Image: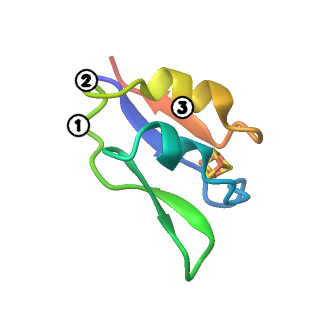
Amino acid sequence: MKVPVIDCELCIGCGSCAELCPEVFEMRDEEGKAYVIAEDKCDVCDCEEAAGICPVEAITLEGE
Ligand code: SF4
């Protein structure tokens, strides 16, 4: 199973991943960063597309 991982150092808080995959990514306003809230939900959204649209390539997919 592929698991999304966010490099918080790179994330600029654009919100695109959370807009595309709200089941998996969530914005935390207090920090202005995105977080993975359900790494096992890539089957209900397209984490690969989310990784592809991240402007700073902060999202990687790990695992099988
Ligand atoms: Fe951060 Fe990338 Fe998500 Fe934008 S798409 S909020 S830069 S992880």
Residue 64 placed where, x, y %?
33, 16
Residue 38 placed where, x, y %?
27, 48
Mark 1 and mark 2 residues within 8 Å of each other at the beta carbon: yes
Q: Nearer the viewer, mark 1 or mark 2?
A: 2
Q: Amino acid at mark 1?
A: Asp
Q: Earlier in the sequence, mark 3 or mark 1?
A: 1
Quadrant of residue 62 within the rendered picture: top left
* Disc number for residue 17: none
Ligand 1 closer than 8 Å to the CB at disc 1? no
Q: Amino acid at mark 3?
A: Ala
Residue 51 placed where, x, y %?
57, 30
Task: Give the CA separation, mark 3 to mark 1.
Answer: 15 Å
* Disc number for residue 43: 2
Q: Amino acid at mark 2?
A: Asp
Q: Which image quarter is the N terminus in?
A: top left
Residue shown at 65% from the left, 43% from the top: 58
Tell me the colour scheme of the image: rainbow
Q: Give whichever of 61, 53 is nearer the camera.
A: 53
Q: Is residue 12 above or below residue 57?
A: below
The crowding category of the residue bearing disc 3, from other C-alpha atoms within 10 Å (few below 14, some 14 to 19, many at least 20), is many
The residue carrying mark 3 is: 50
Residue shown at 31% from the left, 45% from the top: 23
Q: Earlier in the sequence, mark 3 or mark 2?
A: 2
| 25 to the left or right of 10 | left
| 31 to the left or right of 18 | right
Task: Give the CA separation, mark 1 to mark 2.
Answer: 8 Å
The residue carrying mark 1 is: 40
Ligand 1 closer than 8 Å to the CB at disc 3? yes
| 8 to the left or right of 43 | right
